[in-house]
Amino acid sequence: MDVLLGRDLLTLVGLAAVPGFLAIVAVLPLQESPKWLLITRGDKEAALESLTFYRGGTTEENMQIVNEMLMEAEQTARIDIPVCAAVREVLRQPHLRRAMVIGVLSLQV
């Protein structure tokens, strides 16, 4: 196993840190999500700027998308279901149950 992994801990840690560092550098120039800006912060102008950054397009198209996001947020806010009932609903439906089990098992690895 030493032939494959080596014995120099500093080199191993350094090699593992390179992808993490590159990921951080790649994320720095990105803006916040338009949906997050709109729903969490309530900042419609910043959401419009962010949408323009990610999608381009005209202001009218992006404004229509922002309005659709607002309507979706209003519809989602109307759904008021307790966590226990939501978990029960997920466990009752086979395709959701399978996805939940895969997600939980992947976190165990």
Image: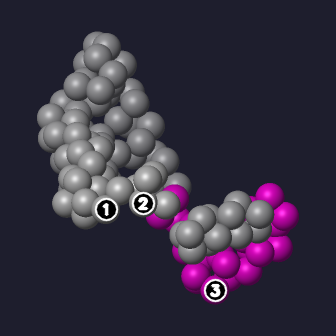
Residue on which the image places disc 3: 84
* Alpha carbons under labels 3 and 1: distance apart: 49 Å
Could you tell whether 28 is left or right of 58 in the image?
A: left
Image x and y of residue 34, in percent: 29, 40
Q: Residue furthest bottom?
A: 84
Amino acid type of the residue tagged 1 in the rendering: Arg
Q: Which residues are magenta?
A: 76-96
In contact (CB < 8 Å): disc 1 and disc 2: yes
Give the quarter of the image for residue 10: bottom left
Residue drawn 49% across the image and 61% down it:
1
Residue 82: name its quadrant. Answer: bottom right
Amino acid type assigned to the residue bearing label 2 in the image:
Asp
Q: Amino acid at mark 3?
A: Cys
Q: Which mark is residue 7?
A: 1
At 23% from the left edge and 54% from the top edge, which residue is drawn? 11
Q: Nearer the viewer, residue 94 or 11?
A: 11
